[in-house]
Image: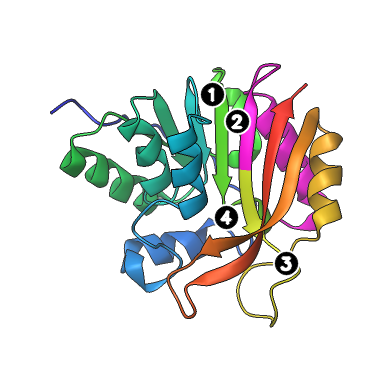
Amino acid sequence: MSEPSDRTAGVGARADSGVEVFERHYAGEPGAGWEIQRPQTVLVRLAEEGALRGRVLDVGCGSGDNALLAAEHGLETTGVDAAPSAITLAVGKARERGLKARFLEWDALDLAALGEQFDTLIDVGLFHCFAPEDRPLVARSMASVVPPGGRCFLMCFSDRQPGTWGPRRVPEQAVRESFTGAGWRVDTLEAAELDVAFHPGVAQAWFAAMTRL
């Protein structure tokens, strides 16, 4: 079994209610909240189609299942999250599964400080955690670590989701404006279902595939 990861301290992210909300979740029972303990169905399809390529960065990786999907396909993979307990869980999963992946405690708004470039970026459930005024900052941070031609695959809560529980609902136009203004081309942006750990098992989402200009 190869060594699965490194752990490097970063800085705190400015997401909803601070890092503390996420840290409490991951320090407790990871299956009790939004973690589904498997990769997202949409990402499984992308991996099978060969859309995940080169060096992969999973931003807001949580306990690591989506990052480890990329690692399973033989890709050099890094996952970052601001919650220390999430990184601990991800490291443990990598070790248990015998997969090589790197997991770092890091701020999604300061990805440039990694000093690295990645061919594919994944964001499942991070973008919608940020206030509207911070969304362009997230998009620019992501752009800072992806060279021209690199891809970003993003899933976020949609304003099509009824009710008021859960994270912020994001309008389609907010995704387009945040990323096109930060050096991305939105190739596809479509309605999708985000797998969740609570009834009815899915939430309404946007799925975006984007290319770095």
The quadrant where residue 137 appears: top right
Write down the residue under mark 2.
111
Q: Is residue 145 magenta?
A: yes
Where are the magenta residues, as a range?
130-153
Spatial CA distance of label 3 from label 2 is 24 Å
Q: Residue at x 53, y 70 (%)?
A: 202
Q: Tell me the element at label 2.
A: helix
Spatial CA distance of label 1 from label 2 is 6 Å
Closer to the N terminus: mark 2 or mark 4?
2
Write down the residue under mark 3.
169
Q: Tell me the element at label 1.
A: helix
Closer to the N terminus: mark 3 or mark 2?
2
Q: Residue at x 81, y 32 (%)?
A: 182
Residue type marked 4: Gly
Q: Please indicate whether residue 36 sits to the left or right of residue 181 in the image.
A: left
Q: Residue at x 37, y 51 (%)?
A: 63
The residue lying toward the viewer, choosing from 44 and 70, is 44
**Closer to the observer: label 3 or label 2?**
3
